[in-house]
Amino acid sequence: MNPTNSIGYPVTIPAAAAPPAPVKFYNAAATTGTGTFNITPKLRISLPANSYAGAYTSTLTFAITSGP
């Protein structure tokens, strides 16, 4: 059965000098999401207009925190 997601979009991930608290971008309701399925997240990065030119980096960590 395909997963039933209850997360509303867009999901905002706050920017900070230190890592922010985890943010869920997808979840599956109980008794859904068994078997094989694809999740394709899309990311959009917004920078203030007065940002300095240069190279910026960030780290995105993905975790499956529970399962059947």
Image (tube, grey):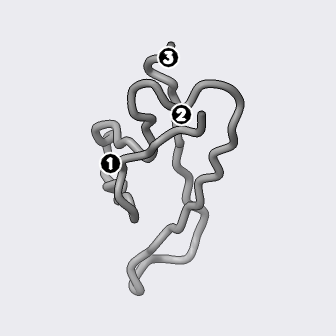
**Mark 1–mark 3 CB contact (< 8 Å):** no
Q: Nearer the viewer, residue 60 or 1?
A: 1
Q: Position of residue 62 (x, y in %)?
A: 53, 33
Q: Position of residue 25 (x, y in %)?
A: 43, 47
| Residue drawn at (39%, 65%) of the image | 10
Q: Position of residue 18 (x, y in %)?
A: 31, 41
Residue kind at label 1, given as amino acid type: Ala
Q: Earlier in the sequence, mark 1 or mark 3?
A: 1
Q: Residues within 10 Å of mark 3 (few under 14, many from 20)?
A: few
**Spatial distance from mark 2 to mark 1, Cα to Cα?**
19 Å
Task: Between label 1 and label 3, give the one nearer the viewer.
Answer: 3
Q: Quadrant of residue 13?
A: bottom left
Mark 1 — residue? Answer: 17
Residue 67: numbered disc:
3
Q: Position of residue 21 (x, y in %)?
A: 28, 38
Report helix, strand or loop for mark 2.
loop
| Residue drawn at (69%, 38%) of the image | 37
